Amino acid sequence: MANQTTLFIEPETWTEITDADVSAITFQNRSKGHILVVGTNGSTPSGYEGIRYNPGQGERNVFLADLFPGASATRVWVYAPEAYGAEVFVSHA
């Protein structure tokens, strides 16, 4: 079953945007500030490394293996560095 929703990302906290292991994902930054996105095998990321997505940017049905090569990623996390947090649309099966 597909999961499709818009999530609020608390400021300065890594937030998982997948609710299960996935192989592909669609997402869009619907905020006025940028976000950082990283894929892991389930563990919460540490630090501030990630792919930067500016307002309106995202990915459409991208395989995690293509987005995060070599990471064996099955989960996707978002970090909102701005004090007001972020909104992210996400869809995955």
Image (tube, rainbow, N blue to C red):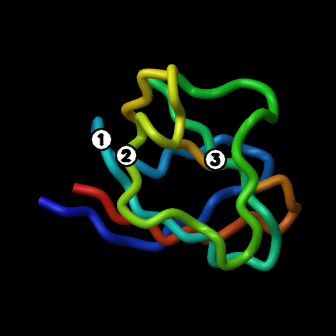
Q: CA distance from mark 2 to mark 1?
A: 6 Å
Report x, y in % for residue 90: 43, 65
Q: Residue at x 73, y 75 (%)?
A: 55
Residue 15's disc number:
none
84 in relation to 47, above or below: below
Query: Image check: 46 left or right of 24?
Result: right
The amino acid sitting under disc 2 is Phe
Q: Which residue is mark 3?
A: 37
Residue 63's disc number:
2
Q: In terms of sequence position, does the residue under pointer 2 or pointer 1 come before the other? A: 1
Q: Residue at x 46, y 40 (%)?
A: 66
For the image, the number of numbered tags is: 3
Mark 2 secondary-structure assignment: strand
The amino acid sitting under disc 1 is Ser
Report x, y in % for residue 14: 65, 41
Q: Quadrant of the C terminus?
A: bottom left
* Quadrant of the rendered image containing residue 61: bottom left
> Does the residue at mark 3 contact the one at mark 2 (Cβ under 8 Å)?
no
Q: In terms of sequence position, does the residue under pointer 3 or pointer 2 come before the other? A: 3
Q: Residue at x 70, y 46 (%)?
A: 51
In depth, the one of 11 and 40 nearer the eye is 40
Q: CA distance from mark 3 to mark 2?
A: 14 Å
Q: Which residue is mark 1?
A: 23
Report x, y in % for residue 67: 51, 42
Report x, y in % for residue 78: 62, 49
Disc 1 crowd rating (10 Å Cα; few below 14, some 14-19, many 20+) is some
Q: CA distance from mark 1 to mark 3?
A: 15 Å
Q: Residue furthest left?
A: 1
